[in-house]
Image: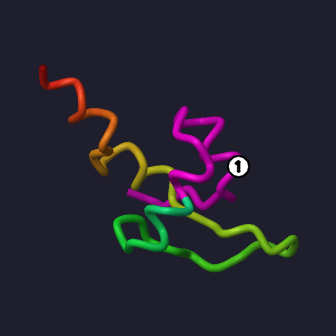
Amino acid sequence: MRPVITDIYAAAAHSGIRPGTLRQRLRRGTLTHHGYDRHGRALVDLNELVTTPTNEQHTDAA
């Protein structure tokens, strides 16, 4: 699958995951960092957001 590289804020709007959560996942290494755009925003692959499980999916076990 071809990567869809976008900045953190566009990825947040697309996925519904808050930008701070995406930054935290970048820092922890659970999301691949693809450099920065010309404005200094971190770039991520949207396809990776769909396939990577998040904590929000696992917290409603009760």
Total numbered circles: 1
Q: Is residue 57 magenta?
A: no
What is the x, y in percent for residue 57?
27, 33
Other residues around mark 1 within 10 Å, as few (<14) / some (14–19) / many (≥20): some
Q: Residue at x 69, y 58 (%)?
A: 7
Q: Residue furthest left?
A: 62
What is the x, y in percent for residue 46?
51, 51
Query: How does the figure colour the protein chain or chains?
Result: rainbow
Q: Residue furthest right?
A: 39
- Give 3 or 34, whichever is nearer the viewer: 34
What is the x, y in percent for residue 18?
58, 42
**Which residues are the magenta region?**
1-22
Is the C terminus in the top left, top right, bottom left or bottom right quadrant? top left
Query: Is 33 placed left or right of 58 in the picture?
Result: right
Q: Secondary structure at mark 1?
A: helix
Q: Which residue is mark 1?
A: 9
Q: Is residue 5 magenta?
A: yes
Is the N terminus in the top left, top right, bottom left or bottom right quadrant? bottom left
